[in-house]
Image (cartoon, helix red, strand yellow):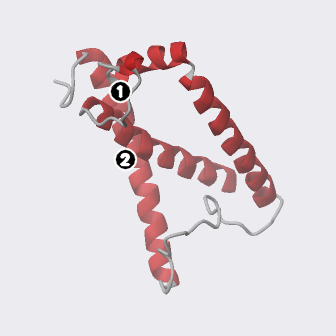
């Protein structure tokens, strides 16, 4: 069950970021200086242009390295290290400092619920964007 919980948390976190990034690009958010090849791209058309320019190879490399680290942590968790699913020991801002165990449990439940919603939202926004070929609100 730990493996399934880890997978659900990971996919939920990815979809929360993916939905935000997808919609932000279609709303016109850009990081400057923007390469000339990326001018006028939408979220739907960006994939092919980024593959052509080589940016997707960079993304593949860095995500691959993160997956290796995650696989090591997952293997240790399944071997009985005591690590909770999705917990990588990262809290640089100190969100959990002085927080009760009950509140931490509530926050974890919220993350699972928001992740599930994000998985549905991302699949919906992709479908709408591809079918309408338009900017938000994709109608």
Element carrying mark 1? helix
The crowd level at tag 2 (other Cα within 10 Å; few <14, some 14-19, many 20+) is some
Give the residue displayed 29% in from the left and 23% down from the top: 129
Image quadrant for the N terminus?
bottom right
Give the residue displayed 20% in from the left and 26% down from the top: 138
* 5 in relation to 81, above or below: above
The crowd level at tag 1 (other Cα within 10 Å; few <14, some 14-19, many 20+) is some
**Residue hosting label 2:** 117
Q: Give how far across and how far down residue 46 sits, in percent.
A: 40, 20
Query: If you read the primary sequence from the N terminus, does the residue marked by circle 1 or circle 2 appear first?
Result: 2
* 86 in relation to 128, above or below: below
**Quadrant of residue 64 within the rendered picture:** top right
Image quadrant for the C terminus?
top left
Q: Give how far across and how far down residue 55 sits, in percent.
A: 54, 25
* Side of 45 where 26 appears, left or right: left
Residue 70, can we see it?
yes
Judged from this view, the residue extending furthest toward the right is: 79
User: Which dot marks residue 126?
Assistant: 1
Pick the residue in front: 129 or 26: 26
* 46 in relation to 23, above or below: above
Q: CA distance from mark 1 to mark 2?
A: 14 Å
Residue 1, can we see it?
no
Q: Give how far across and how far down residue 18 sits, in percent.
A: 43, 39
Element carrying mark 2? helix
Judged from this view, the residue extending furthest toward the front is: 33
Mark 1 vs mark 2: in front:
1
Q: Give how far across and how far down residue 13 sits, in percent.
A: 49, 49
**Quadrant of residue 92 within the rendered picture:** bottom right
* 27 in relation to 55, above or below: below
* Side of 42 where 11 appears, left or right: right
Is the residue under label 2 in contact with that under label 1 (CB below 8 Å)?
no
Give the residue displayed 49% in from the left and 66% down from the top: 108
């Amino acid at each position: 069950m730990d493996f399934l919980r880890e997978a659900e948390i990971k996919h939920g976190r990815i979809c929360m970021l993916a939905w935000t990034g997808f919609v932000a690009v279609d709303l016109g958010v850009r990081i400057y200086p923007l390469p000339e090849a990326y001018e006028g791209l939408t979220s739907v058309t960006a994939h092919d242009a980024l593959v052509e320019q080589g940016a997707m190879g960079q993304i593949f490399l860095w995500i691959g390295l993160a997956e290796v680290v995650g696989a090591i942590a997952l293997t240790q968790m399944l071997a009985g290290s005591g690590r909770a699913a999705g917990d990588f020991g990262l809290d640089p801002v100190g969100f959990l400092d002085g927080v009760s165990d009950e509140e931490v449990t509530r926050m974890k439940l919220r993350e699972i619920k928001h992740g599930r919603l994000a998985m549905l939202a991302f699949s919906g926004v992709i479908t709408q964007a591809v079918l309408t070929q338009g900017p938000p609100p994709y109608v």
